[in-house]
Amino acid sequence: MRILVVEDEPALRSALEDLVRGEGHDVESVADADSATEAGCSDRFDLILLDVMLPGGSGIDVCRSIRAARPDLFIVMLTARGSEDNKVKGLGAGADDYVTKPFGARELLARIASAERRLTSAAGDAEELEIDGCRLDLGRCVARRDDDERPLTAREAAILRLLHRHRKRGVTRSELLEQVWRAPGDLPTRTVDMTIANLRSKIEQDPSSPRIVVTVKGIGYAWGEP
């Protein structure tokens, strides 16, 4: 993969470059918020290792800006603070995964390998779906209804893939957190429900009465077709 390392501490940045390059990935690095935003918003990378504390701005804000420009980019937050509050903020800003400092080389490489598997397996799922008059191009992260075209984020597309893959049953919030956000299933957050609400506003004919992403009482959510 093409990986961007964003870390302001020179020794750690160099170590991360060597570690990731040693696994056969192409690596570039930057050290501040502005450079991270510029590089991350380009189309040169598949994954970004993004430190939370950066000169010139917060990594959370950088994550939010990059996610808006690159819905398909896999973002792993690096944080020295392991509180659930910071994890929730990172996930809410669009991060796909997070690693708490200090972390071991094997742990970080495992997260990168997991991201690579997710990106590869996603390519094997159905990329073009049609349901209730809405055409979903998950590969391009686009939803179309009549002449109205709306962009989807990578996470919204991943939610739809997961629901479609398990369309014969309901998918729990814990499963969504674990498989889409790569977060602990028991993480106390409303992020899943907020993301689903935003997704419905884009794809449902009537978001107040959804027929694509339906609620399964006591379980979570399901693909609308039986």
Image (cartoon, helix red, strand yellow):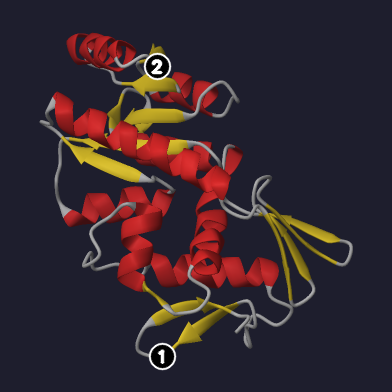
Q: Secondary structure at mark 1?
A: loop
The residue beneath circle 1 is 217
Residue at image position (34%, 66%) is 175
Q: Residues within 10 Å of mark 1 (few under 14, many from 20)?
A: few
Considering only vertical position in the picture, is 13 above or below 83?
A: above
Give the class, few, some or many, for how many residues have Cα within 10 Å of label 2's Cα (few <14, many ≥20): some
Given residues 49 and 108, the one toward you in this image is 108
| Residue at figure coordinates x 37%, y 25% from the top left | 56
Q: Which circle's residue, 1 or 2, is located before the other in the chain?
A: 2
* Residue 118, horizontal then vertical, whole percent: 42, 43
Label 1 and label 2: CA atoms lie apart by: 44 Å
Residue type at mark 2 is His
Q: Is residue 185 above or below residue 34?
A: below
Residue 39 in the image, given as x and y percentages of width and height: 51, 21
Quadrant for the N terminus, please. Answer: top left
> Residue visible at 60% across and 84% down?
226
11 displayed left or right of 206: left
Q: Foreground mark, 1 or 2? A: 2
